[in-house]
């Protein structure tokens, strides 16, 4: 189900099976703080460099034909970080989108955001909403940011909405299904690419940290030692190459295994 990859080589794009590119890639962008610490720099310097990596990987994924790229930008637990770091992270969307939206439009990339955005500072909300509005006409890859997002909270919210519908007489218990619950998740409007085919986590950590708990049920997982600010097109291709070597059975068997 998952593989840990060490950055010890390259995978030229020509070696990828372009007919088997994961439609939805989700990334836990981990290691910004450690990247900065290794260079005796403040943690915010790692986040700044990490945003440059977001630009690089967005273009690379779009060029490969990925349909949805979901990036874990800020979790519901990240509010526990030092106040100065949180403030910097809340200011990043405005700086990021102001510079990057023209390039997103040029690359036909549409911005979406999932999470409890109403809890974000007003300036952050405006930057996000402006980027969504400015790119809404784009028809290529969706760049989906998970911002103030938590997987458990998402499931609780979905169940709460279903219970409310039941209390109002709009839903019977026997009508509840996996499909119905999926339709109440924050990824519902990404259909038919609601569930990631591939999850990548950088920095060497091997956990999913409350990210897309429902949607990752059958995702392939690749954990890489490289820190997020150092992640590049070659590393992305390495992860996809690993994905392409998997035998995805979704709980069943392929014909040759029967």
Image (spheres, grey):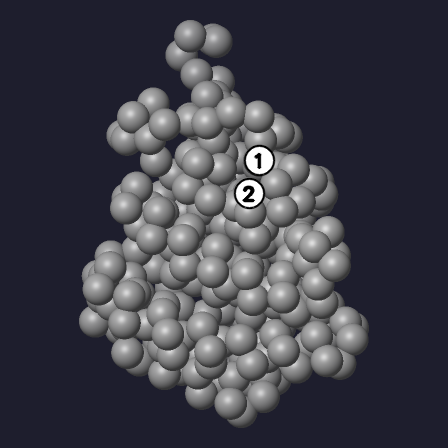
User: Residue lying furthest bottom in this view?
Assistant: 122
Residue corresponding to mark 1: 222
* SS at badge 2: strand
Whether residue 218 is visible, yes or no, is no
Question: Dot 2, crowdedness within 10 Å: few (<14), some or many (≥20)?
Answer: many
Mark 2 or mark 1, earlier in chain: 2
User: Residue 221 at what x, y percent from top left?
Assistant: 57, 37
**Near-viewer residue (16 or 175):** 16
Closest to the observer, 254 or 16: 16
Determine the residue positioned at 27% across, 72% down.
102
Residue 122, x across and y down, in percent: 53, 91
- x and y, in percent, of residue 175 in the image: 50, 59
Q: How many marks?
A: 2
Badge 1: residue crowd in 10 Å (few <14, some 14–19, many ≥20) = many
Q: Quadrant of the N terminus?
A: top right
Q: Residue at x 63, y 78 (%)?
A: 88
Answer yes or no: is residue 207 visible.
Answer: yes
Q: Which of 63 and 8 is in front in this view?
A: 8
The residues tagged by marks 2 and 1 sit, at their Cα atoms, a distance apart of 5 Å
Residue highlighted by disc 2: 200
| Helix, strand or loop for disc 1 | strand
- For image coordinates 41% across by 59% down, the residue present is 55
Determine the image quadrant of residue 85.
bottom right
Q: Residue furthest front?
A: 40
User: In the figure, is residue 131 to the left or right of 77?
Assistant: left
User: In the rendered view, does 240 fall on the left or right side of 205?
Assistant: left
Q: In which quarter of the image is residue 126?
A: bottom left
Q: In this view, does 190 lie above or below 168?
A: above
Q: Is residue 225 above or below residue 54?
A: above
Residue 196, disc:
none
Contact (CB < 8 A) between labels 2 and 1? yes
Please tell me which residue is depicted at 71% across the width and 63% down the height of the picture.
41
């Amino acid at each position: 189900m998952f593989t840990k990859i060490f950055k010890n080589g390259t995978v030229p794009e020509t070696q990828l099976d372009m007919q088997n590119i994961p439609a939805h890639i989700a990334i836990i962008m981990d290691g910004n703080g450690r990247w900065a610490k290794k260079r005796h720099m403040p943690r915010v310097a790692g986040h700044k460099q990490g945003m440059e990596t977001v630009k690089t990987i967005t273009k690379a994924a779009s060029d490969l034909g990925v349909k949805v790229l979901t990036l874990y930008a800020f979790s519901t637990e990240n509010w526990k970080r030092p106040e100065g770091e949180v403030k910097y992270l809340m200011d990043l969307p405005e700086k990021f989108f102001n510079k990057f939206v023209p390039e997103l439009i040029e690359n036909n990339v549409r911005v979406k955001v999932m999470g409890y955005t109403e809890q974000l500072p007003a300036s952050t909300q405006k930057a996000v909403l402006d980027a969504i509005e400015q790119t809404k006409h784009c028809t290529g890859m969706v760049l989906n940011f998970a911002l103030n997002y938590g997987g458990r909270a998402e499931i609780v919210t979905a169940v709460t909405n279903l219970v409310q519908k039941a209390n109002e007489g709009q839903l019977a218990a026997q009508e509840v299904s996996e499909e119905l619950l999926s339709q109440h998740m924050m990824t519902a409007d990404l259909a038919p690419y609601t569930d990631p085919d591939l999850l990548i986590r950088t920095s060497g950590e091997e956990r999913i940290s409350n990210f897309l708990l429902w949607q990752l049920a059958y995702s392939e997982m690749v954990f890489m030692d490289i820190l997020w600010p150092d992640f590049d097109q070659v590393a992305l291709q390495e992860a996809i190459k690993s994905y392409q070597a998997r035998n995805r059975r979704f709980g069943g068997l392929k014909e040759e295994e029967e």
